[in-house]
Image: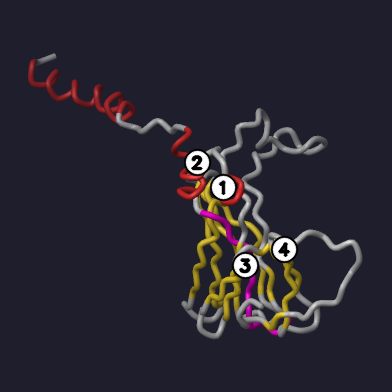
């Protein structure tokens, strides 16, 4: 083989090895950023699609997208994807398919009002706020905090009720929301309380 042919063949032999060596190796930091969708739903009138999106580790958000136009609203939901350091914590539950894919972070789904005018979801502190809180005194005040975001679909306006532990919507009305403040304790006996209209300031 002539010297010229050797010079032409050599790069063809080395090319696959060079291309392989340039491929990026996936690490934990890479798949921590992979995002998943959960709690997908349509408003009763079918005009809006609602879902939460979150990485395996990091801040997530609520996405509200019109089904007949390009209108889209996004509401930050805070630190949804939290590191799972429990061995087997992301494996299928007992009794499930052992070959199934690991499950992603569990996110409380948003709720839709009966009249298709509002979407409500709990929000949490951001990952940065969790990191700043650390494990010192007062950390639980940050790590356990939840707020309630009320999104008006007519214009995307967001009303936030701070420190809400849980909430419920009526099945046949979109005018009211019942919620429990985070600092309230379960009462010994049920006592009727005045409700809050959706979109109204907290009482």
Q: Label 1 near label 3: C-beta < 8 Å? A: no
The residue labelled by disc 2 is: 32
The residue tagged with tag 3: helix, strand or loop? strand
Q: How is the image coloured?
A: secondary structure
The residue tagged with tag 4: helix, strand or loop? strand
Residue 81 tag number: 1
Which residues are the magenta region? 114-125
The residue labelled by disc 3 is: 148
Q: Position of residue 111 (x, y in %)?
A: 69, 69
The answer to whether residue 77 is above or below residue 55 is: below
Left or right position of 117 against 18: right
Q: Residues within 10 Å of mark 2 (few under 14, many from 20)?
A: some
Furthest residue toward top? 1
The residue labelled by disc 4 is: 166
Instruction: Measure how far apart labels 3 and 1 are at the Cα level.
Output: 18 Å
Which of pointers 3 and 1 lies earlier in the amino acid sequence? 1
Instruction: Measure how far apart labels 1 and 4 are at the Cα level.
Output: 20 Å
Instruction: Measure how far apart labels 4 and 3 are at the Cα level.
Output: 8 Å
Instruction: Measure how far apart labels 2 and 1 are at the Cα level.
Output: 9 Å
């Amino acid at each position: 083989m002539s010297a010229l042919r050797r010079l032409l063949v050599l790069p063809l032999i080395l090319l696959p090895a060079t291309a392989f060596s340039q491929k990026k190796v996936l690490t934990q930091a890479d798949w921590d950023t992979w995002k998943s969708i959960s709690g997908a739903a349509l408003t009763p009138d079918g005009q809006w699609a609602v879902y939460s999106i979150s990485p395996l580790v990091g801040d997530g958000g609520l996405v509200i997208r019109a089904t007949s136009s390009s209108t889209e609203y996004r509401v930050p939901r805070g630190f949804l994807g939290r590191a799972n350091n429990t061995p087997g914590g992301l494996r299928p539950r007992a009794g499930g398919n052992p070959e199934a894919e690991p499950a992603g972070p569990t996110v409380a789904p948003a709720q839709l009002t009966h009249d298709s005018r509002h979407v409500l979801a709990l929000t949490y502190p951001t990952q940065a706020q969790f990191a700043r809180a650390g494990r010192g005194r007062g950390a639980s005040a940050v790590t356990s905090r939840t707020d309630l975001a009320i999104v008006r679909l007519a214009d995307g306006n967001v009303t936030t009720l701070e420190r809400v532990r849980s909430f419920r919507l009526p099945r046949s009305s979109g005018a009211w929301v019942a919620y429990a403040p985070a600092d309230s304790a379960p009462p010994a006996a049920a006592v009727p309380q005045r409700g809050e209209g959706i979109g109204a300031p907290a009482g």
